[in-house]
Every structure is written in structure tokens, then in C-alpha cells.
Image: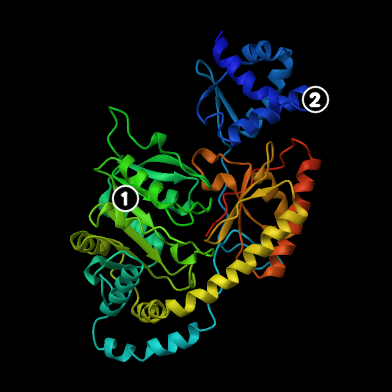
Amino acid sequence: MDEGRAFRLARQLTPLLGQGAANQAVATGLRSLILDGRLVVGSRVASERDLSLALGLSRSTVTAAYRRLRDEGYLVSDHGDGTRAAIPVSPSSRPDDTAADADLLDLTIAALQAPSSLPDLVVAATVHLPALMAGHGLHPLGLPGLRSAIAAHHTAAGLRTSADQILVTQGALHAWDLLLRTLTRPGDRVLIESPSYPSVVDAAAAHRVRVVPIGVSPAGWDLSAVRPGRSAAPPVLAHITPDHQNPTGYHAPTAARRELLDALPPATLVLADETFRDLTLDPIARPPRPLGCHGGSDRVITLGSLSKSVWAGLRIGWIRASPDLVRRIATGRTSQDLSTPVLEQLVAEQVVTHLPTLLPERQAMLRQRRARLLAALAAFAPDWQPTHPSGGLVTWVDLGPGASSTRIADAARAHGVRVTPGPRFTFGATHDRFLRLPYTLPEEQLVLAVERLVTAATTVAGRGGTIRSRAPLVWTA
């Protein structure tokens, strides 16, 4: 008998055992421990006999709870290897499967509609198209005018940049994929925040690298796992979001940025994802300088994009790195694509040049929508605890102990709202008590979405611990 494992599990489980049938309470408690990450996926769970003794319950009660969790996919038992914690496998849904449902409020996408001035900027961009049409139209590094505009934007933010340090890509995810393709090999260690933007993790998995999670919360990064063990190779690359992290909203102060770079192994290249940097909504007396200002041009690579600050339909992103690395990436990208489309780059040059006048309008709109969403949550769901982000596009909502964003997301679809549950943003599908809510829809739609979510949550609560089905790993932007 492994008394230590059984009694440790019993101590974690006892506070979660509520009213009702004992076997259901044990199953609900164990499920919550797994989904919250307190019982690590893949770890061995105490045997039914040992846990029943530690809890002072009959063995048949614990056996019934284990059987239920095996049926749901939260426990896996192998002869000779005991019982281990697991996460049910969920099917992926198509990104366009809501197109026919006009009444569905989609909160899986954190993106704004295009600014009203974009059509005029497109017209201005087309003036320069005929001159480029006389050539072949392939520019692997990006159009010189756009590279210069992006360099000037970084310099104005405090990070001195020249045009030869910029590579134009087809969005932020494309930039991340190019970096993985250029800098890593299968089996390399890559450090990624958890929770994180799902596509960041998906791209890493596609390149077959070993993901090393660094915990992040609205309070900051957990640096305890940053330094590798004696026998472990340091991460080749680290993906970090210092500005309004998605989904937690964490905005790292200057001291935290320096502490992070000091803690990371010197051999690890650091990717600073600045996708949300231009969406700071609350004034800061001394805003933190870009991460690249602290780590040097060769060690810190910066990723930028217009998808969040301007419009996701304008598929323009970029990489800021040393000129040598920029050319290396441009050479390697030809196995995936040859160049970013010319017309989109011309439009992007106009957009980047006009960002000083575009951004205040975007920020003012987001402040209003953020306020309306938080007010609706306070009115309709006072027990939920949303973050109050200083920028970005989302709030990270703590639904409370025992709550399941997976079950709420599953039920919400029937009530006309689509959300992404917390496990989609994490490693091992943990953080089920959290839900990411963007404040990008019009204000009246945000209020209606909250009302529908609360109705769905009430429905789930009425079903107790019963799970109808696992919510799919929905497409998330």
C-alpha cells in the first residue's frame, strides 16, 4: 500500500467532497483536481483500496467513482501499471461551422472589425501598385517601404531598429512558424507560457519540439521551472508575451522583464511577442520598455502584427531580429512560401504610417467595451472573478472552485453563444475553472452574451456532476 500517495490525494480531495451521493462527490472532486492541474495528467493515482481507507469510505464507493471517471476518460488503468490521471480526447471543430448561424454570438475570436479609415488607406496604397507590377512581385524580406515604416515604429517605441532587421510575414503565427522552422529541430526544448495562445502550442507540436511550460498568471511569470536541470539541455527558444499576455492579460513591469531574461539560460533565444503592445488601454506613468531593450538585438527577437491592433483580415506580421538572422529566415521560408502578397504590404505600409492616428480610436472603443463587459459580469455573475486587464482584448475569468468552463462552453452553444474553455489555452488541458472572454463584440452583444453564458452555467449547475459531452477544442483566434 502506498499510504503516502493515498493520504496526499485524500487531503486534496476532502475539501471538494460536497453533498449528495458519496461516489459522485469523489468523482466530481477527482475530476476537478485533474482539470485544475493539481493532479498532474499522466501521474499515478492511488488505488481504489488505498484511497477508500484514506478517506474512510467503502471500497465500493471509490470503485464506482473510478469507474465513472474511466468511462469519461479522466482515468486510465493498465494492468501492472496502476491507474493514471488523463484528459478525454476531444474532436476539433471546423473553423467555419458557425457561418450558417447568424444569431450565434462568437466569443472564440479576439479580433476587432476593421477601422473606418481602412478603405481610404487601401485606395492610397493602390496608387503605388502599378510601379511594382512591372517586376516579378516576389519580395522574401518584404517591401522596403514597409520594412522602413515598421523599423520607425519600433524606434518610436524605444527599440532602435533599422529596416534590415525586419522580415515581413503573413501574420504573427506565420512568423512563429518560420522561427520554429529556422531555429529548431525535432526534440529541441522550446519554452512556452501556460496558459498561452493555442496556436502557439499547436505550431510547436507540428514541429515536434519538446514544449517546456512556464506558468503565467495575472500576477506574473513563475520562473521556478525556467532553469533546466543538470542533465537537461537549455531551451533553444522561448516564446514570451510581456505585453497584455493572451489570455491572462499580464503586463510585465520593467523589473519582471529583466528578471525573466536573467533567469533564462544565456543560450536560449527569446521571442518577445508584441502583438498586443499597441493596445495598452490604461495610461501608465512610466510604461515598460520593449523586452528587446533589455536583452540585446541578437538574443531577443521581436514579433509584431497588425491582426489585433488593426484588422485580422490584413494578414501582415513581422519579425525583428539581427540582419543575419533575418536573411537566414528569408532563405529558409522558400520551402513554405516565397513572399508576402504585395498589395497587402502596400496597405500595411499605409496603416503603419497612420498608426498614431488609428490607435487612439481603437483604444477608446476597447475601453468602452471592456467596461461594458466587466459591468455585465458584475451584474449577472457576481461570483465570477474576471481580470481587469490594462490592455489587450480579453479578460481571464475565474469561475470558482469546482466550476467547469468545458461544461459551460458545451451548454452555451445551445443558448446561442460560443466560447473557448480554459483547457484549450493550457498544457495537459488544465485550468478548467477559467474562461477567456474577449471584449471585441459591440457592447449590446457583449451584455447579451454574458446573459446567455450565465443561463448556460445555471443549466450546468443544475445537472450537478453529470457531463453530457466534452466540449470540442474549438478554433480560437
The mark found on residue 110 in the picture is none
Quickly name the residue at label 1: 270
Crowd class of label 1 (few under 14; some 14 to 19; many from 20; radius 10 Å): many
From the top left corner, tell me how far across and down residue 472 is, in percent: 60, 49
Quickly name the residue at label 2: 21
Residue type highlighted by circle 1: Val
From the top left corner, tell me how far across and down residue 403 is, in percent: 69, 40
Say if 354 sits above or below 297 in the image.
below
Q: Is residue 74 left or right of residue 465?
A: left
> Residue placed at 71% from the left, 60% from the top?
375
Say if 11 sits above or below 386 in the image.
above
Tell me which colouring the rendered structure shows: rainbow
SS at badge 2: loop
Crowd class of label 2 (few under 14; some 14 to 19; many from 20; radius 10 Å): few
40 or 298: nearer the eye? 298
Q: Is residue 163 left or right of residue 44?
A: left
Asked if the residues shown at circle 1 and circle 2 are in contact, with their CB atoms under 8 angstroms apart, the answer is no
Say if 465 sits above or below 104 in the image.
above
Q: CA distance from mark 1 to mark 2?
A: 51 Å
> Residue placed at 25% from the left, 64% from the top?
334
> Residue placed at 68% from the left, 29% from the top?
29
Residue type highlighted by circle 2: Ala
462 or 162: nearer the eye? 162
Say if 217 sits above or below 440 in the image.
above
386 or 410: nearer the eye? 386
Q: Is residue 67 visible?
A: yes
From the top left corner, tell me how far across and down residue 9 is, in percent: 60, 20
From the top left corner, tell me how far across and down residue 120 is, in percent: 47, 88
